[in-house]
Image: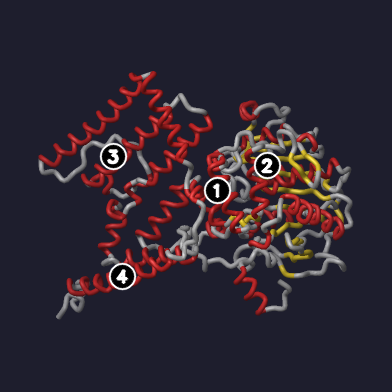
Amino acid sequence: MTTEENGAGPSAEAHLERLNANLIKIDALSKRLTAALTRRKAADPALHGPSNDVFLKAATAYVAEMMQNPAKILEHQISFWGKSLKHYVEAQQALVKGELKAPPDPTPKDRRFSNPLWETHPFFNYLKQQYLMNAEAVTQAVSGLENIDPVDKKRVEYFSKQIVDMFSPTNFLGTNPDALERAVATDGESLVQGLENLVRDIEANSGDLLVTLADRDAFQIGHNIGTSEGAVVYRNRMLELIQYSPTTETVHETPLLIFPPWINKFYILDMKPQNSLIKWIVDQGFTLFVVSWVNPDASYAGFGMDDYIRDGYMRAIAEVRSITKQKQVNAVGYCIAGTTLSLTLGHLEKAGDPSVKSATLFTTLTDFSDQGEVGVFLNDDFVDGIERQVAVDGILDKTFMARTFSYLRSNDLIYQPAIRSYMLGESPPAFDLLFWNGDGTNLPAKMAVEYLRGLCQEDRLAQGGFPVLGGPVTLSDIKLPVCAIACETDHIADWRSSYNGLRQFGSTDKTFILSQSGHIAGIVNPPSKGKYGHYVNEAPLTTPEAFREGASFVQGSWWPRWGEWLAERSGKRIKARGLGDSKHPVLAPAPGTYVLSAAQREALRQSVDVPV
């Protein structure tokens, strides 16, 4: 009778049989992995990292520092080696005594090292302490550089941190106790599942590695996310215009039109009813229209900023005015869509066109003199590479953008998800926000280069004028009432830069609200959560520092405050409007078809009679 039959658990033979079976699976998966990697498309080398010039400047500055201030360098080196040697001696003394325990650990807490073995086991604790000491030494050495341009120093600090984070012992199978424990407990099954996850991700991305952050099968757009009722009432080659069904008997006379960023898909504003900004706006009694941008392929290569303004912004504004029989609309732009809305507003002002009554900007940069954290990717080494690559592809592929933004939070969006998926063999979580984050879009080649060169690098909207449909537009050309919402910890659109841009608008009616949290959570912050507050300051706009110093903190979401601001500029209440009109029939139910993938659109075409 075996131990399994006695109820004592699997026998040694059963463990060995399971282990051998898993080894066979690993061999088969390794062949799939090799085949998947061969499908990787060649990309410009500049897209994989900064030029060597960054590190050459750092080395030059360090040598200069060593020559000019040798005492400072020696002090730093002696401190580092002293800590390392002391730790080594303490670890050796513990081993000599025959004690299987770690020496004293003065290193700071780090959630990457949450497994108790990092504290108690001498091997893992030694690795952790040495890694953190080395990380501290590198960080101090870089932060102490003085003979280097501030922009270059910022890049050196950022990319040095990336290298340090990459070499964390948690990122390697042989030095990750969680992964090793799981592998032993499952007779290698976790490693098989992890390799399966790795192969799946590489196959899904045509030979590139992009970690799947969320369960792709857990969400279906229009069924359990993006479910607010409405309909597509207009469609062209750039966009679908969605009108949402009213939920109140009366609505404000002036309609509201939201332009979301085309770098991502619009349903971040309508993830689920509890946190849907779209539903909340409709419930406040506004006639709401939202643009859903097309996800461009190589056939859109020649489409530039003018195309987005003419066939996107101006066309959507015209159609909303036609449907609602109103002379003016209120408009909202989020992120890059806010930047382009600003360009549109300046153009309309110069053309004497009063079609927009007021504008709201969510996390929008219009002054790029300080590009924030993302600025490390906006130097010529990267942008030159992007320009060469899009000339070949016709688009800036969503993979490059997703990877870039993920590296701004690499531990949270790359390494930890990779550890869970590839080392522990776990399935991605059913997390709607991460699902949306992985549902990216491409950018047309011409538009991407115009944006990166003319706005990000040359800052032409704030300095000199950016060309829009044949004429230059500056921030001072924007004269209508504007409300700008920025986010305190935004790593994409720094709130100080957003403030400085608004300050230069030609408007006399300017409102700035600073929300707590970041680029997404600070905007998608429903009042029902009571999670993040916001700051307001009624004083005239001067500097970000003055705003923050004199600001009052208000607990809770900024949505109600903005709703009041918007209501004051939206006219009287009238009977709620129906969807579309005789010239704008319903083309598809919300959330439309442009938001879907090609495969999803094909499935929709076969299931219902919907023009796609």
Taking the image as shown, residue 271 lies to the left or right of residue 57, namely: right
Coordinates of residue 330 in the picture (x, y in percent): 80, 48
Q: Nearer the viewer, residue 112 or 68?
A: 68
Identify whether 26 is placed above or below 135: below
Taking the image as shown, residue 41 lies to the left or right of residue 35, namely: right
In space, the residues marked 2 and 3 are separated at their CA atoms by 46 Å
In space, the residues marked 4 and 1 are separated at their CA atoms by 37 Å
The residue that disc 1 covers is 385
What is the three-letter code of the residue carrying label 4?
Answer: Asp
The quarter of the image holding the C terminus is bottom right
The residue that disc 3 covers is 129
Q: Which mark, by number, is residue 27?
A: 4
The quarter of the image holding the N terminus is bottom left
Identify whether 164 is placed above or below 578: above
Q: Nearest to the eye among marks 4 and 2: give it.
A: 2
The residue that disc 2 covers is 454
